[in-house]
Image: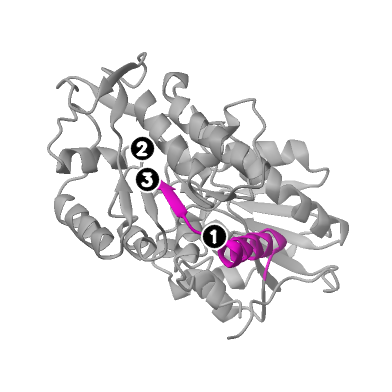
């Protein structure tokens, strides 16, 4: 099996134009950044490239604008923060990927940077379009993918771009992610528990199905658990529910039974009549029609803590509740605390993934200890299940 080509410090990049694909997809509220983790992790490598007198073009996405220009998903807040952090000339290009940007890039001086506007404003990005990929590749000499969290996607700036540029490498952040997850996979000990949050089953159905064969417990939390509660016949009020999910859930339970994997869903919930309200603990059979499930309840928290205590390896992706409101962060923090405590005393190997998971944990002032903390969500889960990631395959 061929190995990934990693960027090396010995590579001569002075005066060369580096196309750097990052994941600067940070959570925004009223166009203000709510969590800076992904940006701060990217800064050391950007500074290293500046020090080595490279010319740098940064590509990133933010949210899912679906090929349209959405002002709320502009990278302007990211640009402003980077401008504060980097002692270098940093420019922001809001136009299309055309001759104008090619001309501007040709005037870049050593140590200068251009941040392109949200690449997903271009329709060709999600379509893995050859034309867009070729235009992007024409802007530089060397391509470096340092966005592991996007590497499960066949998109122009992740996948097809490598077809049109002479040199392509994986960056240091990507290398760290791959090596850390591989180490956890190699050293994992049973029982293995996977805690999965998020809202849509359809986006994680393949992951869940494949993980069933490799783990002992799958704990379903977050809005995704609503679908399982509804499937079991419990009323979920006004809670988020994915349409036509019963067939998928039925398949999950059948596969879990075949593989002796336990599926654990909430016994109680923290509910409110609105996302901005205070919470009330309710058993799963006591939810009213006007209520929304926004977190797991105390009985469920205790149950999950017991499962973690009985586990030797824990994989976690997705918060347990609507953490944006402090009233509904208790479940997520309880899980984080228990995993951290058991990791600290060496009784647990733990790996956490996903931007929302990290953002939720960072809302607390507490310090946590995990074997590995990954900024990736979908890529993290797909890599765990042993899938080949398109963005990594093209770097081999």
Q: CA distance from mark 1 to mark 2?
A: 26 Å
* Figure quadrant of residue 283: top left
The mark that comes first in sequence, 3 or 1, is 1
Mark 2 residue crowding within 10 angstroms, few (<14) / some (14–19) / many (20+): many
**Disc 2 target residue:** 222
Left or right: 285 in relation to 361: left
Residue sitting at 66 percent across and 65 percent down?
179
Mark 3 residue crowding within 10 angstroms, few (<14) / some (14–19) / many (20+): some
Question: Which mark is in front, 1 or 2?
Answer: 1
Mark 2: which secondary structure? loop
Residue sitting at 49 percent across and 27 percent down?
30
Q: In the figure, 341 relative to 189: above or below?
A: above
Q: Tags 2 and 3 in contact by the CB under 8 Å rule?
A: no
Magenta segment boundaries in residue numbering: 170-196
**Disc 1 target residue:** 189
Would residue 297 be visible to someone looking at this image? no
Mark 3: which secondary structure? strand
Q: Which quarter of the rendered picture does the N terminus lie within?
A: bottom right
The mark that comes first in sequence, 1 or 2, is 1
Farthest-out residue, bottom: 1
Task: Name the residue nearer the viewer: 78 or 317.
Answer: 317
Farthest-out residue, left: 233
Q: Which quarter of the rendered picture does the C terminus lie within?
A: bottom right
Q: In the figure, 210 relative to 51: above or below?
A: below
Mark 1 residue crowding within 10 angstroms, few (<14) / some (14–19) / many (20+): some
Residue 219's label in the rendered image is 3
All told, the count of numbered labels is 3
Left or right: 326 in relation to 168: left
Question: Which mark is in front, 2 or 3?
Answer: 3
Residue 143, position as x, y percentages in the image: 66, 70
């Amino acid at each position: 099996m061929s190995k990934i080509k990693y960027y090396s410090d010995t590579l001569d990049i002075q005066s060369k134009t580096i196309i750097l694909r990052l994941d600067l997809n940070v959570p925004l509220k009223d166009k203000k950044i709510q969590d800076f983790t992904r940006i701060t992790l990217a800064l050391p490598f950007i500074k290293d490239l500046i020090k080595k007198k490279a010319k740098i073009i940064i590509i990133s996405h933010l949210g899912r604008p679906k090929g349209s220009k959405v002002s709320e998903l502009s990278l302007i807040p990211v640009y402003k923060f980077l401008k504060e952090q980097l002692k270098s000339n940093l420019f922001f290009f809001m136009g299309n990927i055309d001759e104008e940007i090619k001309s501007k890039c040709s005037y870049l001086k050593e140590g200068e940077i251009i941040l392109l506007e949200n690449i997903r404003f271009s329709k060709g990005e999600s379509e893995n379009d050859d034309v867009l990929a070729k235009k992007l590749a024409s802007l530089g000499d060397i391509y470096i993918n340092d966005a592991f969290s996007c590497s499960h996607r066949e998109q122009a700036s992740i996948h097809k771009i490598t077809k049109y540029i002479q040199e392509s490498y994986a960056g240091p952040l990507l290398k760290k992610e791959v090596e850390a997850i591989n180490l956890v996979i190699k050293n994992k000990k049973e029982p293995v528990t996977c805690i999965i949050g998020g809202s849509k089953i359809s986006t994680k159905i393949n992951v869940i199905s494949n993980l069933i064969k490799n783990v002992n417990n799958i704990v379903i939390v977050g809005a995704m658990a609503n679908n399982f509660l509804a499937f079991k016949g419990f009323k979920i009020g006004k809670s988020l529910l994915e349409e036509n999910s019963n067939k998928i859930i039925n398949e999950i339970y059948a596969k879990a039974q075949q593989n002796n994997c336990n599926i654990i869903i909430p016994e109680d919930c923290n509910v409110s009549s609105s996302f901005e309200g205070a919470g009330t603990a309710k058993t799963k059979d006591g939810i009213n029609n006007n209520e929304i499930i926004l977190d797991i309840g105390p009985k469920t928290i205790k149950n999950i803590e017991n499962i973690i205590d009985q586990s030797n390896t824990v994989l976690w992706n997705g918060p347990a509740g609507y953490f944006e409101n402090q009233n509904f962060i208790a479940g997520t923090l309880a899980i984080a605390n228990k995993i951290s405590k058991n990791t600290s005393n060496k009784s647990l190997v733990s790996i956490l993934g996903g931007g929302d998971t990290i953002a939720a944990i960072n809302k607390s002032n507490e310090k946590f200890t995990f074997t590995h903390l990954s900024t990736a969500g979908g890529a993290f889960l797909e890599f765990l299940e042993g899938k080949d990631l398109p963005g990594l395959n093209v770097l081999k």
